[in-house]
Image: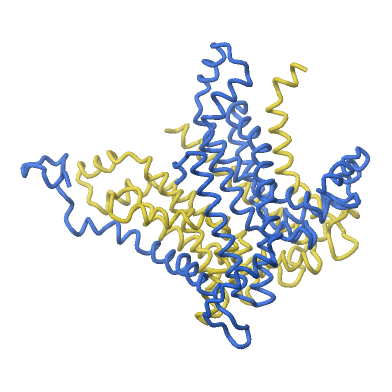
Chain colours: A yellow, B blue
Amino acid sequence: MRWLRRHLVVIAGTLALVYLLLPNVVVLVFSFNDPAGRYNYTWQSFSTDAWSDPCGVAGMCDSVGLSLRIALTATVAATVIGTLAAFALARHRFRGRAAGNSLIFLPMAMPEVVMAASLGTLFLNMRIEFGVTTILIAHIMFCLSFVVVAVKARVASMDPKLEEAARDLYAGPLQTFLRVTLPLAAPGIAAGAMLSFAISLDDFIITQFNAGPSTVTFPMYVWGASQRGIPVQVNVIGTAMFVAALALVVAGQVVGARRRSRA
Amino acid sequence: MTALAAPPEATPEAPGPPPPRRRLTPYWLLLPAALWLLVFFAAPLVYQASTSVQSGSFEEGFEVTWRWANYTEALDTYAEHFARSFGYAAAATVLCLAIGYPLAYMIAFRAGRWRGVLLVLVIAPFFTSFLIRTLAWKTILSDNGPLVGALDTLHVLDVTATLGLTTDDRLLATPLAVVCGLTYNFLPFMILPLYTSLERVDPGLHEAAQDLYARPLTVFRRVTLPLSMPGVVAGTLLTFIPASGDYINAQLLGSPKEQMVGNAIQKQFLNVLDYPTAAAMSFLLMAAILIMVTVYIRRAGTEELV
């Protein structure tokens, strides 16, 4: 009883972790299923068919490619624009700064469906054809805020004395920026970029409202499949993305730890 | 303004006002982002307000006729959807707090060198598309799955059925399934801010409280919980706002009887093509959330969210 009371937090926390990770385990296990019908909801028998032919279903790998292209483009654009804005908001005191902060913050405090419907209405009335461009515009819009927040936090914690020191050592403004400011801000910029890549890649609601009939991103493909039958390959892609991202994170942590131990 | 009053022989440490060109720098830096958000975020919201009082049809086009009936009709038809949205979102937020707090606490104070690993595990689910993970819940909650079987033999389903949370010895297509899905999907948004605020709490404060003969529960109630309030406020907002606008969980895990406002907006916008009604509903959703959030932040007394 005493033991239970002492470890109550750890038990509850572990159960929460199980709740969080259980669906990923199910996705992994069911990627080896050989489903009886069109839906992959109940376990039948073990099979590696889906893994040996991940692109065997029409249109799915194309949708993954489209999602990756959109996420990459949106990330680059949002990271550049967002980093500039973050420097303005973190480094300068100017009239309109509070308004700028609110404008950046508001999209994050808005339910996605509201932004999705309003932007879609605008495109419809401007007679702009829905397609990759409209998806990109929308993705850059909601990724921006996340980049600004991530970079701003980093820039605010940077010691301005380091840049003063660089200038005292006769570095020009450009040299100071490239050799001191940018490397110092890099972790924040990288965090913002990674965040916006992940959000853009996985976005469904805004994409559904602003996509054309021929622009099927991977989440759109999965949504469609959930209505007409889900191929096992969806689980293969889900698991592969999970493993790839996890490997990236672990590699990043190892590199970071090594760098810290050297410093 | 004080800089203007500085003596002319000011040293380099106290520079005068920046030259006009440098004073414009922040505006140039902010310009692209501000323009993008004004055109593609703020303008659509204004535009949506005007759409919400239009009348007409998709074939003949829509016109602003100040038709306020769009609002009353939407409220009449979809009152239950609104109620469900906020009810389910509130339930999911409370559950997220109840489930997420112990985990955040464990990572902050009990994990030791496993802290980094546990944090990665909290973020890890994000790496698989959330639609795929939500579909996985269909497998977990399925009618002849082990979970339904276990809960049935333990007679838990009878209890939840009398509470109106489930029907017919099922978990899928019930309010419970939708709330469970919402809780699952937004749990990391609760855990991360909680962890950030708990991590800043000095464990020395726990020891100090214990030295003053505070019982563990008192330490938590009087020291840890108050200090983690910014995380609680941020976490509940980050969970409640997206959950109340969600329509994916209701669509995939619920039945037509569990549809939320998001489902109605999506249907009006993408299937019925009744844009004024969709606009009126999303405007109502936005207004309701803004009011609730404002009241909540006032009550909670935290303004350090940004």
Q: Quadrant of the C terminus of chain A?
A: top left
Q: Is residue A174 left or right of residue B232?
A: left
Q: Quadrant of residue A77?
A: bottom left
Q: Residue at x 64, y 50 (%)?
A: B126
The relative height of residue B212 versus residue B239 in the rendered view (above or below) is above
Q: Quadrant of the N terminus of chain A?
A: top right
The relative height of residue B203 versus residue B184 in the rendered view (above or below) is above
Of B57 and B205, nearer the camera is B57
Of B32 and A163, nearer the camera is B32
Q: Is residue B29 left or right of residue A147?
A: left
Number of numbered discs visible in the structure rendering:
0
Q: Residue at x 75, y 44 (%)?
A: A22
Q: Is residue B173 left or right of residue B168?
A: left
Q: Residue at x 47, y 37 (%)?
A: A259
Of B275 and B25, nearer the camera is B275
The relative height of residue B245 versus residue B44 in the rendered view (above or below) is above
- Residue B89, position in %: x, y? 66, 50
Q: Is residue A29 left or right of residue A240?
A: right
Farthest residue to the bottom: give it. Answer: B60
- Residue A135, position in %: x, y? 55, 69
- Residue A215, position in %: x, y? 62, 74
Of B288 and B254, nearer the camera is B288
- Residue B275, position in %: x, y? 60, 75
Q: Quadrant of residue B218?
A: top right
Q: Residue at x 62, y 68 (%)?
A: B72
